[in-house]
Amino acid sequence: MGRTVLPFTRELYREEESWGGFRRALRREDRELFDALFAAARYHTAACTCAGRAVPFDAILMSILVEERRAARELSRRVEDLERLLAGRRGECPDGS
């Protein structure tokens, strides 16, 4: 028996292509962001395949959200590290001793 469901990778590329008009209307720097969002979805293709969603775009959006959340968490961690560093320096003497 043949497959009745397209492999998710093809579904993902088909979805990305369907947004072509939207992408073309974006400013150049926003096109790069748009492309990065779909790259994030491609990073999670295996998870999207396992999701078994009736609407593939649901899994694509969830993949994008996971990557955006990862980036936000990393930025928060970096801000906290910088705040600790600055707090530690506040306790130092101005002449460095």
Image (tube, grey):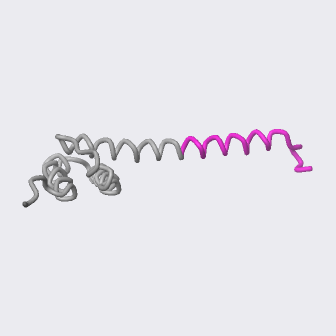
Q: Which residues are magenta?
A: 75-97
Looking at the image, which residue sits at the far bottom? 2
Q: Quadrant of the N terminus?
A: bottom left
Specify the principal SS of the magenta part.
Answer: helix
Give the left or right position of residue 45, taking residue 69 as reference: left
Is residue 2 part of the magenta span, yes or no?
Answer: no
Residue 85 in which image quadrant: top right
Residue 31 appears in the rendering: yes
Residue 9 in which image quadrant: bottom left
Measured as percent of width and height from the top left, residue 26 is found at 23, 47
Up-down relation of residue 39 to residue 86 (above or below): below
Measured as percent of width and height from the top left, residue 34 is found at 28, 50
Residue 36 appears in the rendering: no
Give the left or right position of residue 82, taking residue 33 as reference: right
Residue drawn where x is 17% and y is 40% of the image: 54
Residue drawn where x is 76% and y is 39% of the image: 87
Measured as percent of width and height from the top left, residue 62 is found at 32, 41
Looking at the image, which residue sits at the far right? 97
- Count of picture labels: 0
Residue drawn where x is 31% and y is 51% of the image: 41
Residue drawn where x is 79% and y is 42% of the image: 88
Measured as percent of width and height from the top left, residue 29 is found at 32, 52
